[in-house]
Structure formats: C-alpha cells, structure tokens
Amino acid sequence: MRVPRFAALGDSLTEGVGDPVEGVWRGWAALLAPGLGTTRQPAEFRNFAVSGALARDVHESQTPAALAYAPDLASVIVGVNDTLRHGFDIRDLAVRLDKVCAALSASGSRLLTACLPDPGRMLALPAPLARPLARRQRAVNAVVHALSERYAAVHLHLADDCWVEDRTLWSADRLHPGERGHRAMARRFHALLAAEGLAHGAAPGGEPEQPVPGRTARAVWLATAGTAWVARRCTDLLPQLLGLAGAEVRHWARGTSARLDHLAENSLSTALASLSPAPPLARMGE
C-alpha cells in the first residue's frame, strides 16, 4: 500500500491561524493528516496554504507546487479574502477554482472542499455593511458547491448556524477558528473520509490543549493585530464597502432591495456559465 500524500491549499484558515503551537501555526489540516494513514504507514503532509491568499494565488502559485508533490488528497479552501477585496469578481474566482480542481483531479487527487460563513456575520457588522459581504460569500459558496459536485469532492459545510454561533470554536479575531474549531474541522473531515475508506487512522482529539481565548485575549487582539488588520483592509475594501452600504440603505428606503439580490444572482449565473463543459445547477445560499 502506497503511503498516502495529503496537500493543503488555501489561505490563513488552512495555514492554521488561530491554532498556535510553539510559536507556529498548526491548524486543522495538520491535525487531520496523522489520521489519514496508519501507525505503520503515516500519511505524508505538506501545507501550501498562505495567509491572505486569494483564489488567484492558489491557482497560480500553490497548485503547481501541489501538483509536483503528487498528492492523493488535496484540500482547496479559499475565497473569504476575495470577498474582502475591492476588485471582487465572482466569475474570475469561479474560473480559477475550476482550473485548480480540474488539474488536481486529473492528477489523481481526491479533493476536500468547504463552504464558509461570511465575514460580515462573524464580525457582527451593521446590516448595511454586512449584506454586501454576505452576498459575496454566498456566491463563493455556490461556486464551491457546484465544483464540489462536479469533481466529487469530500465537502464540509461550515456555514451552518451551529458552527457560526458556537463562539468556543473561534479565536480572538472572530474570523479564524481557535484550537477547538480547528480540531472540530479535522474531526468532521476525518469522519467523511473514513466513511469512504480514505482515512485509516484515528481521528484527532476534540478537546483543546490550550485555553479558549477570553475577553482579555480578544481585547488585546483588537487593540493590536486587529487594528492593523482593519487598517490594511480600509485602504482596499472600505471605500467601496461604504459605497455598497449606501446603496443598501437607499434600496431599503425605496423598498427595492430585491434588485441587489437579482444583480448578485445574475453575476453568479454568469460565473457558473463560464465553467466548462456544463456547470452543475446551483443558486446562492444552497
């Protein structure tokens, strides 16, 4: 039996942000990897994910490196950073992710994918600011669902209320899982893989080895790293997001908010139509 290889592609979620161990990030993928092989033949694992990565980065940089590694399993989880960029383009994201999934699948890799909660909800932003981000993330999730179906990926739903509302799963920044959350992701993926005979070892433990961040930790993050994070996003997203929020308020006042939803649906339909040969049917929020 060949020693299985697992490659993880994506952004800070897969890099392991929120789960520090001895000064470095660990994360769900590293927690999952030991349970993919056996005691005699542990799985090989490489993490190609980089904090801040966009779909473009996964397509252009991470995928060629992963293909050279020739993995049996490859996780592709990306898109939240794209929703936080001024130039968000759901069609470009869909085409790039399609190419990533096609290349990895053609090489013999079984894909792992996940849909994610929208950042506006996680950060508890006011409705006019949160709704545009929610539309973007729903569109990303719809694309991921379509590609997951097409390429028979092992898919994990992480936009469910039970996942979003359990704050013990999240780190101080409210955007990344904490250790408990990373362990929950690893265990849920392990269960799905084991059901298909793709995980042969034990699932990772569910209880964290480090304390869950409390109010003090959250306050420190907001005053230090959180402030820097917001400042970086302000130079790119905030001017546009304020414009989008203004449009939300105007349409709400006129009773025409449905028009914004229709525009987002049309953009999603165009994105799915750009996939080849024939895209699976999907709608935002599915």
Image: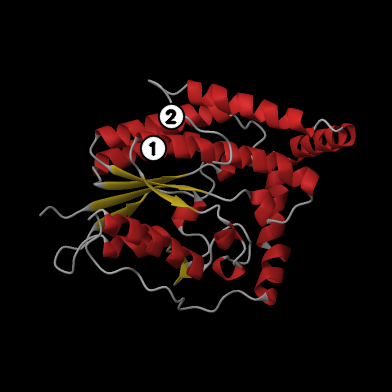
Mark 2 residue element: loop
Whole-percent x, y for residue 153 in the image = 35, 43
Q: Which residue is mark 1?
A: 149
Question: Quadrant of the image for the N terminus?
Answer: bottom left
Q: In 3D space, how far apart are the residues under numbered discs 2 and 1 (Cα atoms)? A: 7 Å
Which quarter of the figure has residue 240? top right
- Looking at numbered disc 1 in the image, what kind of residue is underneath it? Glu
- Looking at numbered disc 2 in the image, what kind of residue is underneath it? Pro
Q: Is residue 89 left or right of residue 246?
A: left
Dot 2 and dot 1 residues touching (CB under 8 Å): yes
Q: Is residue 57 visible?
A: no
Question: Quadrant of the image for the C terminus?
Answer: top right
Which quarter of the figure has residue 277? top left
Task: Tell which of 239 and 142 is nearer to you.
Answer: 142
Task: Tell which of 278 and 172 is nearer to you.
Answer: 278
Task: Tell which of 75 and 161 is nearer to you.
Answer: 161
Q: How many marks?
A: 2
Residue lying at 44% horizontally and 76% vertically, measured from the top left: 207
Residue lying at 77% horizontally and 35% vertically, measured from the top left: 244
Q: Is residue 61 left or right of residue 216?
A: left
Neighbours of disc 2 within 10 Å: few (<14), some (14-19), many (20+): some
Whole-percent x, y for residue 219 in the image = 72, 70
Whole-percent x, y for residue 280 in the image = 43, 29
Which quarter of the figure has residue 27? bottom left
Q: Which residue is mark 2?
A: 280
Whole-percent x, y for residue 279 in the image = 43, 25
